[in-house]
């Protein structure tokens, strides 16, 4: 199997690792994305608190700048686990940002008004 940029980007997005880490994991797995993800999951230690905090602040800032949110959808793969109609305030944006940063296996979709 080959190692290409699309596979590296997929691993970086899912695992929050550098290009080098993603590339190394793909090479070690013979280009198999699932195997590379599994290997990274097993070797990746606890996240640095400062990195998590910075990611959280970036996510909260992005949510607050984007405007009013009318619905929050939590998905795992293609399955919607929960859909919550809301009007988020800054506190809600902080909570959603926190969950989005810490729970990387879930996809949180925000439906905006308009």
Image (cartoon, rainbow, N blue to C red):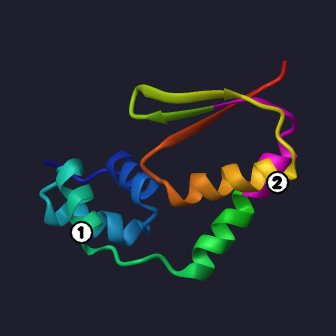
Q: Residue 88 at x, y = what percent?
A: 82, 40
Give the residue number, with chain letter if any, for mark 1.
Answer: 42
Give, as a single range, the part of the protein colored magenta. 60-72
* In the depicted structure, whether residue 64 falls above or below residue 39: above
User: In this rendering, would 32 be left or right of 18?
Assistant: left
Viewer-nearest of labels 1 and 2?
Answer: 2
Measuring from the top left, give residue 113's x and y in whole percent.
83, 23
Q: Residue 37: percent from the left, percent from the top?
A: 27, 57
Decide: few, some or many residues near mark 2? Use Cα within 10 Å; few <14, some 14-19, many ≥20: few
| Residue shown at 80% from the left, 57% from the top | 61
Which quadrant holds residue 111?
Answer: top right
| Magenta stretch holds residue 107 | no
Q: Is residue 16 left or right of residue 66?
A: left
- Find numbered disc 1 in the image and state the secondary structure of the residue it sits on: helix
Residue underneath mark 2: 91
Q: Quadrant of the C terminus?
A: top right
The residue at the far top in this view is: 114
Q: Is residue 32 above or below residue 26?
A: above
Percent coordinates x, y for residue 80 in the rendering: 48, 26
Which residue is at a point 41% across and 66% down the rendered structure image?
Answer: 19
Crowding near pointer 1: few (<14 within 10 Å), some, many (20+)? few
């Amino acid at each position: 199997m080959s190692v290409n940029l699309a596979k590296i980007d997929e691993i970086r997005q899912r695992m929050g690792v550098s290009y080098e880490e993603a590339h190394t994991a793909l090479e070690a797995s013979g280009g198999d994305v699932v195997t590379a993800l599994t290997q990274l999951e097993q070797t990746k230690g606890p996240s640095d608190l400062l990195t998590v905090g910075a990611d959280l602040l970036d996510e909260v800032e992005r949510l607050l700048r984007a405007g009013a949110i009318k619905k929050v959808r939590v998905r795992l793969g293609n399955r919607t686990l929960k859909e919550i109609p809301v009007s988020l305030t800054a506190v809600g944006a902080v909570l959603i940002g926190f969950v989005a940063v810490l729970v990387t296996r879930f996809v949180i979709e925000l439906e905006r008004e308009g």
